[in-house]
Image: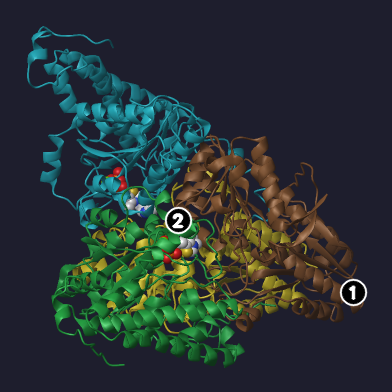
Chain colours: A cyan, B green, C yellow, D brown
Amino acid sequence: MVLRYGAIEKEIFLSSSIPVNFDVERYFNHHKMMNRIRAFEETAATANNDGLVLGAIHLSIGQEAIASGVCQNLEKDDFLLSTHRGHGHTLAKGADPQTMMLELLGRKGGICQGKGGSMHIADFSVGMLGANGVVSANINIAAGAGHAIKLKGGNNISCCIFGDGAINRGPFLEGLNWAGVFELPVLFVCEKNGFASTTVTEAMTSGEGGKQRAQSLGIPAEEVDGNDIVEVDECVRQNIKEIRSGGGPRFILCNTYRLHGHTASDPALYREQEDVDEAWKNDPISKCRDLLKNAGVLDEDLKGHQTDALSEMQAIYNRAKQAPWPELQLAYEDVQDSGDPREEAF
Amino acid sequence: MVLRYGAIEKEIFLSSSIPVNFDVERYFNHHKMMNRIRAFEETAATANNDGLVLGAIHLSIGQEAIASGVCQNLEKDDFLLSTHRGHGHTLAKGADPQTMMLELLGRKGGICQGKGGSMHIADFSVGMLGANGVVSANINIAAGAGHAIKLKGGNNISCCIFGDGAINRGPFLEGLNWAGVFELPVLFVCEKNGFASTTVTEAMTSGEGGKQRAQSLGIPAEEVDGNDIVEVDECVRQNIKEIRSGGGPRFILCNTYRLHGHTASDPALYREQEDVDEAWKNDPISKCRDLLKNAGVLDEDLKGHQTDALSEMQAIYNRAKQAPWPELQLAYEDVQDSGDPREEAF
Amino acid sequence: MTVMTYADAAKAALAEEMRRDPLVWAVGEDLGRGGVFGQYKGLVEEFGPDRISDAPISEAAIMGASVGAAMAGTRPVVEMRFADFALCAVDELVNQAAKARYMLGGQTNVPMVIREPMGIWRSSAAQHSQSLESWYTHIPGLVVVVPSTPADNKGLLKSAIRSDDPVVYLEHKNIWGVEGDVPDEDILLPFGKARIEREGADISIVSWSAQLHVASEAAENLQKKGISAEVIDLRTLWPWDKEAVFSSVEKTGRLLITHESVAVGGFGAEIAATVSEHMFKALKHPVRRCAAPRVPISYAPPLEDMVRVTANNIVDVATTMMDSGN
Amino acid sequence: MTVMTYADAAKAALAEEMRRDPLVWAVGEDLGRGGVFGQYKGLVEEFGPDRISDAPISEAAIMGASVGAAMAGTRPVVEMRFADFALCAVDELVNQAAKARYMLGGQTNVPMVIREPMGIWRSSAAQHSQSLESWYTHIPGLVVVVPSTPADNKGLLKSAIRSDDPVVYLEHKNIWGVEGDVPDEDILLPFGKARIEREGADISIVSWSAQLHVASEAAENLQKKGISAEVIDLRTLWPWDKEAVFSSVEKTGRLLITHESVAVGGFGAEIAATVSEHMFKALKHPVRRCAAPRVPISYAPPLEDMVRVTANNIVDVATTMMDSGN
Ligand SMILES: Cc1ncc(C[n+]2csc(CCOP(=O)(O)OP(=O)(O)O)c2C)c(N)n1
Ligand SMILES: Cc1ncc(C[n+]2csc(CCOP(=O)(O)OP(=O)(O)O)c2C)c(N)n1
Ligand SMILES: [Mg+2]
Ligand SMILES: [Mg+2]
């Protein structure tokens, strides 16, 4: 779908509701990506309800501006490390949603051959080195990927996205300190969505949070409205530029809200429905759409993003449902080069 | 030895070189304790040279003002958790240097029955819950001891002393966050002695250091000259008061210098002798003595602290040398209540 | 007796112990909302948030702070959520909790229970499925408990809470919902006392935790083939009930050990080695293990199943053992 | 051939590999000053501080960052200083390094060597003396190397650095200074190939790491008593050389396994279980283990010695095995 403007095309740039130098095409693309992420996850939720996703999946609905704003600013040879809530990041980094959906269903052709599932989604062909089932673990791994870049001498960077709950584990301190000490090209992004599973994250967090912690570890840090694609995009772009030009690691705190339960099966009864309703008003996709509408983009094209994305993901889901299980011999492959994994078993 | 003043007794309180309201008796006691710590460690170093201390020992020579200033401000039922460099802390908390020396020599009657050695020195009878061979590990343990106080409802506090290298391990973040979240009565004290083993600590530390990190974790933090017993004592006293009155955890950064090598056997050739010489000018014991002299205390009594301490520790060492090894059956005791530790062995 | 699930039996045990002893408290992520498997549901209402305590995502602090809290006179029950996450707190468990009593010359005990839900559970994949019970058996100072039934989960958890030493308490995620009769009274099961799940004459099958149920199923099937299997539930791996196993092997002359965890370096090896040594003459057939290949757990069910030790596997091995007995 | 210490042989191996492959680098605390046992002495001068890298006291980051650096195309050699401190980084090793290749469907390898100096070493006490090699054998994805001689420490470290999978490389602290002939050339020892340290006819003694030397001493003493012991150095525990052990037992009919680590749940159990099963008929005597009691390591030498497995222990057990062969 190409970018098309409506009648109000020109004047709009003078309107105060959109930022100066607003790059319509850029946000049109973000809008499209956010819709694809949303559609992927809604479809995954359906698959979950259909009983076809077998392990736990964690939806990032409401957090798409971070995924799109961060990962679309990465190059293919940049590394990305993500979390258990990583579908959006992975998609925005350029992974193929078909192989992702196959993975969620544990089918043949899944990006991890059906061996990983949602929490271990990865696509090395686009620099996506993995979600992780262990909260915070990817912070050190991302620092290390940045270390490899420094040692090998490249212009690429490493990016790690993690939740607000992850800042309470040791690797947050150790990984940020590491990146700071070795002046590594690493972008740390914290998605402050208010929850860590069923717990209000702030209740278990002492001090002001991730930004201040990062600063205390010598990492320049900024905070943005993570539901505002423009804020996210600009902040990320600027920081990546600085990192690439040798500026060392950076940290961005993105404020957002987890609109769904912790997992796709969690009704999240531990919070007030009115808070959730309130948060929906701040939906990053609607906000982006309003912005683009104000910038004169045709509403039908914006709606098209949604419908196209939904049919794309539906088709993907349909194909995934038809796919066979992985071949059984895979169970014994890729364990390691030495030794017979079957020794003394059964 | 009782406190005696020289001729200049009165006027001195008007002199600018000593603090207002200077409590002579208090610092006289600190001076005595610092001398005892120094003497204990010099004697331990001798024992080490004599080949009678078998494991590694870490001397805190030059850091005695922190030990005395922190631990003499603790009550007996306060908990103390220390480090591998913990002789001074332990002594100042009230442990018997005889049982400590026996432990360093691995003899019968050692405070840990010869099973722990220097790095595991502990004296539960005075609330000293242990040095630790794992850097940073005691931070969480101390937070937990504070947690027990909160649950049981006492007026005592928990105190944890650790080095500047320890702030780079995860438990620093997790333990301080824990204490902050649960508002525990814990005093964290960081001894910034410039080194972590053979490494200049700052070279491996990103950001400004422990104080800023603690603050970012919501812990009120102060910084003092750790070689100035008055600064340490006053800051610690004030903070303990606040902790006892329900103020939650506190953090104090004490700047100091490690005058000896990392272990008693380390010649520390990786640093400039002139830096060490320079640092000796800032010896906390000499500084305290000067202060007390200025306050009119008789120099011979101050010298007496040193000679008394040396002969006390020499006598202790002599007794320890004569002591037998621990009884062999101890090897199988205190492992745990269930199961036979000898099962399938040998 | 009340019919209860494995999860509820543990909850009853914890509640009883918390009522009995105000120094008992539990701590872990999300406990205030009942814990991730509902095994703490309703407890915060009775005991309040200080004693059913939430925690930050800080496994090292959950474990480490509990070590300190245990040394300082309380009795923490530590919830690790998934046994795999306990790997974020191994220094705290192995270097601190397990060694403190000994290393400090008996000056302290470290009375704490570390609950680690383990095992394969509906496509949870490699980082949420592991069983490492054998690791803990190798560590002096630790007690290792692996309950398989609701009644045992009550009786053993109560004993674990009263233990003055650290207890690694491994509940299996796949049997949270299994129901069974649970005594209403203050039942305390001793460590190191196995349970004969089923008597038999031809072969002894030793197992524990969820795999015990697989062993029982196998024994049923063997019965149909005319092979009478005695099934022994070890209940605790340290200490483990050598006597029970020895006297069963004395009777049957054949031993098969089955566990869900990896065979290589698994606790089955310890039992096999011990029995092969001490019961050499009584053995009509070499001791056999029936345990998992040395492979991480996959996500896709057919691949996950490839590393699962099934009743069929056990029946096959047991049958060979009968055929080729010497 | 050059006579070198165990420490220097490893240093030579690392230096050769670093010269050969610019992607090899080492990282750990104090490496710039030679490392805590001098095993990196002089390397920073040749390779610079980026490739012989200091590290903060951050074991989890040393391990975790190395996992990332390995995935991103370098070959880190990770120095853990003491095997005990590796317990601060178990998630990074077991949940991340070991599982990544499998769990991500073969999209990556994690080529890293984790050096963990282990074992009892002059009153180092419970937190600086542990040997946990059996733990690592239980983890799919890991290679486990336990060299006992300078030559092996060169040949195995070089192979470890070239391995595309994570290798837990356990050097024993007590033999850093042991000297021996080391080939000057590019020697690469394969994993899973044992070394016959000494041939013998009456009993097979299997060991590894520092304990191999104790086993050899025992074999000397047994010789004086007229018992001819074959001593086998496994060199690597995963994979381990079953064939070598089997064919030795075929010849001698008796097997004694000795290791410094705790007997219960130790790797000796795996060997004993495997041999007892597969070589049942060949055994003239039950397989015996000679390993440590389930006790933390003490500080005081006489107590420390109480948990040490000595040549005398081995001689005693081996002698009984000869006497009571059936
Ligand atoms: C080390 C570890 N502890 C606990 C968990 C269980 N767990 C999975 S997601 C989660 C909450 C994470 O919260 P946050 O980091 O804020 O990410 P979010 O889910 O909000 O995206 C928890 C506790 C885990 N996976 N790993
Ligand atoms: C987890 C861990 N890593 C490494 C070591 C080895 N080590 C012992 S003391 C020390 C330096 C500690 O530095 P610091 O915390 O500043 O204390 P200091 O020695 O200066 O008192 C190191 C690295 C250890 N004991 N534990
Ligand atoms: Mg969150
Ligand atoms: Mg220091």
Ligand 4, seen in the image, is in the quarter at bottom left
> Residue D223: which numbered mark, if any?
1
Check if mark 1 and mark 2 are on a common chain.
yes
Q: Residue placed at 86% from the left, 78% from the top?
A: D322
Q: Residue lying furthest right in this view?
A: D226
- Front in this rendered view, residue A166 or C192: A166
**Of pointers 1 and 2, the one earlier in the residue sequence:** 2
- Number of marks in picture: 2
The reply, left or right, for residue A182 in relation to residue D297 is left
Looking at the figure, which quarter contains the C terminus of chain D?
bottom right
Judge whether C119 appears above or below D292 on screen. above
* Position of A136 relative to A2 (above/below): below
Q: Position of residue A184 (x, y in %)?
A: 41, 37
Across and down, in percent, residue D55 comes to 48, 50
Q: How busy is the neighbourhood of tag 2: few (under 14 within 10 Å), some, or many (20 plus)? A: many
Q: Chain of mark 1?
A: D
The location of residue D197, given as percent across then percent down, is 83, 61
Query: Residue at the location (42% across, 25% down)?
Result: A96
Dot 2 corresponds to which residue? D57
Would residue C237 be seen by someone viewing this image from the given angle? yes
Q: Is residue B54 left or right of residue B247?
A: right
Q: Label 1 sits on what residue type?
A: Gln
Q: Looking at this view, is D208 or B237 the one in front?
A: B237
**Left or right, residue A171 beside residue A275:** right
When asked about the image quadrant of residue B36, the answer is bottom left
Disc 2 marks a residue whose amino acid type is Ile
Camera-nearest residue between D181 and A263: D181
Residue A141 versus residue A266: which sits nearer the camera?
A141
| Numbered disc 2: secondary structure | loop
Count neighbours of disc 1 (C-alpha within 10 A) and say few if under 14, some if 14 to 19, many if 20 or more.
some
Measured as percent of width and height from the top left, residue B81 is found at 36, 73
